[in-house]
Amino acid sequence: MTSVSLFLAGKYLRPRRSAVSVITVISVIGVTLGVAVLIIVLAVMTGFTDLMKSKLLETQAHFHIRGYQGTVGDPAELVQAAEKVGAKAAGVVQTPLLAQVGEKLDTRIIAIGTRPEALRDFMKLQTYLVLGEISLKPGEVIISSDMARRWNVSAGSRILLHSPSKLTGMVKIGKDGKVELNRDRAVYLPGEFTVSGIYSFGKYDFDRAVLFLNAEDAADLAGLPWGFVTMIYGWVPDPFHMERQLDALQKAIPQYFTISSWQQENRQLLEVLQVEKRMMFFLLVFIVLVAAFSIANTLITSVYQKTREIGILKALGASDGVVLRVFVLQGLLVGVTGACSGTLLGVLVIRFRNDILRLAARWTGQDLFPKEFYYFNELPAHIIAGDVILIAAMAIILCTIGAVIPALRAARLDPAGALRYE
């Protein structure tokens, strides 16, 4: 009898020139759009999170070692301690700077000074180098392609870098409360550097602000004593599972040094991305839920429309279970059809997402995914099979549940009363 129920369920779903058929098509479209939107949104959120983590690991160290005074006087000791627990490390001078090109002054610059080997071996900067080379000889600097565009410079150009601490040290507040020259530090000249390379990590906030210097040049600009650094950058083979290594390292170094992982450095951002993904899933489930209610409404209408046919079926000996299965299977078929078509639509939209964005931007004349706000040049997406299966299963289950109430109503119809009514 299951085959009979399935046959009748499919027959009732066939498009016919009636209001019920139109409502049925609309219900299928509703499920399709709900499933597609859920897949698209979760894929984009997952892709954004994955790409953000990838870019964070490319542009940051896996962990940082800092001193309570803000400086590290003997970086070699900490580097050796990191190597003993299976990590790689390098001393780094990280300091804010002001860049001057001609009469233009850029105030939002962060310099990272370290050894060229650290940039090549650990940060893999050569992978993202678009022009020049990684040499970082004294007086050389590596800037981003965004900086090169803003400053209108290229490899071989010369720029000036100002130290904020040295600039502020040129003046002081006198005893009478007036600003006066600090005679001990009244003469100050900025550092002049040659652009030896241009990089692009493809992460807007990093490319916007960070340039690379020789460690000694950066220390001089920061006003640090010879051999001092501001922190230690460290890298491990597996940045997602490094708790044991960091615990062992913390025990091996003096207590006045602190270690922070890249997850801790970016905890707020990562938590926000995770919460947003959960909330988007929760809210968009209501789209499929609305479609399920629409299916229930469609089947209730169908039951009243097919009262005579149900009466004939039951008069011919069809049990309540057979009639129940007909309408439950009808909801199941709507759910399966909507889930399959929605999955296909969602995958196609994700596949051509950037083409769609470019087309929409051409039509509207506006950039729908500005990198200044979202950090990346293109819309990221990552479809996870488990998410797709969960969404499709949820849609099918909700549609099937939505068909239960009208199915019970149809199963309880009295055949004599149904035929008398007709």
Image: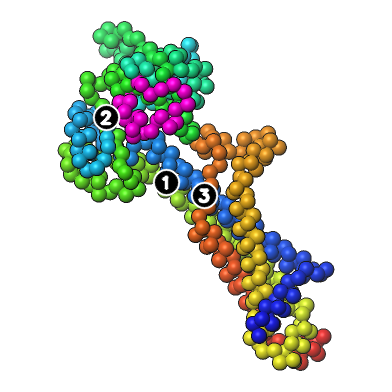
Do we see residue 264 in this rendering?
Answer: no
Q: Quadrant of the N terminus?
A: bottom right
> SS of the residue at dot 1?
helix
Q: Quadrant of the C terminus?
A: bottom right
- The image shows residue 305 at horizontal and vertical percentages of 78, 77
| Earlier sequence position, callout 1 versus callout 2 | 2
Residue 156's image quarter? top left
What amino acid is found at the position of numbered circle 1 in the picture?
Leu
**Can you identify the residue that label 2 sits on?**
91
Tell me the distance, in whole angstroms, between the alpha carbons under discs 2 and 3.
36 Å
Span of residues in magenta: 113-136
> SS of the residue at dot 2?
strand
- The image shows residue 304 at horizontal and vertical percentages of 75, 79
Q: Residue at x 67, y 39 (%)?
A: 359
Tell me the distance, in whole angstroms, between the alpha carbons under discs 1 and 2.
26 Å
Judging from the image, the colouring scheme is rainbow
What amino acid is found at the position of numbered circle 2 in the picture?
Gly
Please say if the residues under marks 1 and 2 sit with CB atoms less than 8 Å apart: no
How many C-alpha atoms fall within 10 Å of the one at disc 3: few (<14), some, or many (≥20)?
A: some
> Eyeballing the image, is 417 above or below 11?
below
Q: Residue at x 47, y 26 (%)?
A: 130
In the picture, measured across the screen, residue 264 lies left or right of residue 333, that is left
